[in-house]
Image (cartoon, helix red, strand yellow):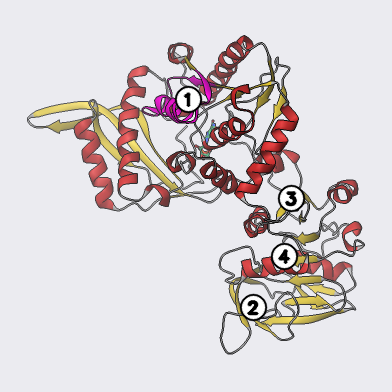
Amino acid sequence: MTTNSIHEDRILILDFGSQYTQLIARRVREIGVYCEIMGWDVAHEHIAAFNATGYILSGSPESALASEAPAIPDIVLEADKPVLGICYGMQSMAHQLGGDVDNTGHSEFGYAEVQVIKPCRLLQHLSDRADQQVLDVWMSHGDRVERIPDGFYVTAQSANAPIAAIAHEQKPWFGIQFHPEVTHTRQGTALLSRFVIDICGCAANWTADNIIDDQVRRIQEQVGDQQVILGLSGGVDSSVVAALLHRAIGAQLTCVFVDNGLLRLHEGDQVMQTFADNLGVRVIRVDAESRFLDALKGITDPEEKRRVIGGLFVDVFEEEAGRLTDAAFLAQGTIYPDVIESAGSATGKAHLIKSHHNVGGLPDTMTLKLVEPLRELFKDEVRRLGIELGLPATMVQRHPFPGPGLGVRILGEVTKDYADILREADDIFIKGLREHGLYDKVSQAFAVFLPVKSVGVTGDGRRYDFVVALRAVETIDFMTARAARLPFDFLDEMSRTIINSVPRISRVTYDISSKPPATIEWE
Ligand code: XMP
């Protein structure tokens, strides 16, 4: 292990609006180097203060020729540090440094072969063929570089882009027309590693155990001997925060786990077992089922249900927290994509379709300071930390579960009866997915309760009972999704098991809608 601080070597990724910017950051982190993303239009002081070891310029849906095209900040080109321009990043480099970019219909989308014609430090010895230096890459561009700026040379070409990669003769500046961050570019990680490790000279010390050591030290410094409270939901993020804080400050942490009656089968007991029994974390379990169900009586509108559940969660949490009079800090499971999105840079302007309530939100009236030890981490890093901290893989790898829980999976009015039926059906489906090795192949799966009656027949009798829909989706970002192609025999088995063992269900359907136009949840 190197003695470098894990943040000392650092890459700044300037985002020009590409959908792949976060993927670049995740790849750099996987290589073991800390990086952050900033919008291309961020104030120069922030770029200077970050003091990057090297810069990566992202792609963009824009054209470098447009009058208001996003531009590379001068401070980056004046810094005399390594720069890697990807796609738009390369075009913008060429354009700003005196070369020519053209948009006369030479677009390339998808697979392409790139031939290295003059090796440079970035591309040397990287190849997908034994007899010639050719790379299988993934392209996605409308514009292309037609003439390189003074001081550069062309290092690679493709059928549709005679200038597919460039390098500066003296400076450690490189441009590539293709996307190394996507897995279709087979040497993509090797290329990024070449840039950040060999060219920038960064040490690969961004690893789960180093991150834990670093966070433990920072939490101890921030908190001192004061008390911290945390809203534990059983989801991945708050669970990892709990495990991390427990490692850092032990008994100074108190978790509040609110059982709102809208959790999955045995979920409350599992949370208590994992944290209180196995890890020895202090957890206050609040049984608030009847308060939530009373408050939800007669409410059928999904957004209204979300508001009621979210509002009541804050009330209950606040009451419990109020009893811990010596608490000075509130811990939250904010992760890096939340930070990027709320920064409102060129990155992630996700529009709000449903008002998502995040469990653990800071109640307005509380005057606690925040501890957010996951603020720098992507979800996959949070999961790796969780495993390293000793959380069960089934907890760390679990699908997302919405804050309002079963409240938005029971269509219309929520009742305890309906919640109990749904819990049984959902548990059969999730267990079935696990037993058939399908759970980790889908991004999210659950059952939905439909309060409509449908006719069925069992033995000699007619049944007039409720309907359950099963939903399983595949998605990368949860913004778009497609229904998982689960094997028909598996669905058949699930349908039979649910109808036979869950009273009052007479029919099971499988939801095959994509998002858009449907959403993942039914409400
Ligand atoms: P939709 O239904 O909008 O879901 O396609 C996208 C992702 O968000 C989750 N989701 C929620 N999460 N509070 C949450 O914390 C909510 O109100 C909420 N609604 C949807 C959903 O489970 C999926 O992962």
Give the mark, 4 or 2, whose residue is nearer the N terminus. 2
Q: Secondary structure at mark 4?
A: helix
Q: Position of residue 16 (x, y in %)?
A: 76, 56
Q: Secondary structure at mark 2?
A: loop
Q: Up-down: is 243 above or below 69? A: above
Tag 1 near tag 2, CB within 8 Å: no
Q: Up-down: is 430 above or below 41? A: above
Q: Between marks 4 and 2, how big is the CA–CA gap?
A: 15 Å
Give the residue at x 64% y 30%: 332
In the image, 148 versus 67, the foreground residue is 148
Q: Between marks 3 and 4, how big is the CA–CA gap?
A: 16 Å
Q: Which residues are magenta?
A: 256-284
Give the mark, 2 or 3, whose residue is nearer the N terminus. 3
Residue type (three-letter) at the residue carrying disc 3: Glu
In the picture of the structure, the residue carrying the numbered disc 1 is 276
Tag 1 near tag 3, CB within 8 Å: no
Q: Is residue 248 left or right of residue 475?
A: right
Give the mark, 1 or 2, whose residue is nearer the N terminus. 2
Label drawn at residue 126:
2
Q: Between marks 1 and 3, how big is the CA–CA gap?
A: 35 Å
**Residue 210 in view (yes/no):** yes
In the picture of the structure, the residue carrying the numbered disc 3 is 36
Q: Secondary structure at mark 3?
A: strand
Q: Quadrant of the N terminus?
A: bottom right
Label drawn at residue 197:
4
